Amino acid sequence: MYDWVLHFAHHKHSTTALFGLSFAESSFFPIPPDVLLGPLCLGNRKKSMWFAAVTTVASILGAYLGYLIGYAFIEVALMIPGVTQQGVDWLGGEFDVRGQWYVFIAALTPIPFKLLTITAGFAEMNLLVFTLACLIGRSMRFFGVAGVFWLIGPKALPFIDKWFNWLALAFVVMLVGGFVVLKYMI
């Protein structure tokens, strides 16, 4: 799979695939775009910053979809046992005070970003503040990833070839850990 993804860096549809994955991950898809962004940057280092820009823009557009999902389906959420109007009102107040930090931290870390974009919609977070938190967090994350892969370039290939399975496992553990942290945080 790793070799296939590296090969994809020079494919004419690599940017489209990266855009689609980045968009979907911000609103409903469980796989973060880093798994494609990193190998694409390794496979075509000259386009690393382009790949980071595409990932960032698509992720922010997907975050708007996540926000819309939360905003539009609040009535459905209120039908879920344990979800109350009082709880939603509390969440709205919490997002008025600290929402920018929640969204920023989720945008920057392995915490599942889609959960915070949807929650921001539920809480009707200020859209300008939401956009800025997404833009800053996602830009730092994706340009950071692209920059690291651009900087280390081919020197990373032997390390990744040797440790790919363990790196993939560590990534899954971080993803699940993000869900656990979020569960106890909200």
Image: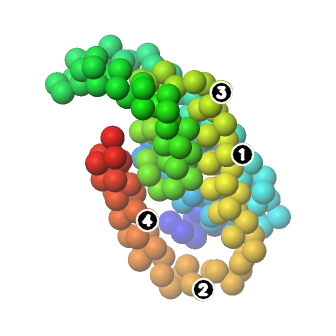
The residue that label 4 is drawn on is 171
Kind of residue at disc 1: Val
Kind of residue at disc 4: Phe
The residue that label 1 is drawn on is 54
Q: Distance between the residues labelled 3 and 2?
A: 43 Å
Q: Sequence order check: which comes first, mark 1 or mark 4? A: 1
Relative side of 84 to 132, left or right: left
The residue that label 3 is drawn on is 128
For residue 158, the mark is 2
Relative side of 134 to 152, left or right: left
Q: Residues within 10 Å of mark 4 (few under 14, many from 20)?
A: some
Q: How far apart are marks 3 and 1 (CA)?
A: 21 Å
- Please identify the quadrant where the C terminus is shown: top left
Q: Residues within 10 Å of mark 2 (few under 14, many from 20)?
A: few
Q: Position of residue 22 (x, y in %)?
A: 58, 44
SS for tag 3?
Answer: helix
Kind of residue at disc 2: Pro
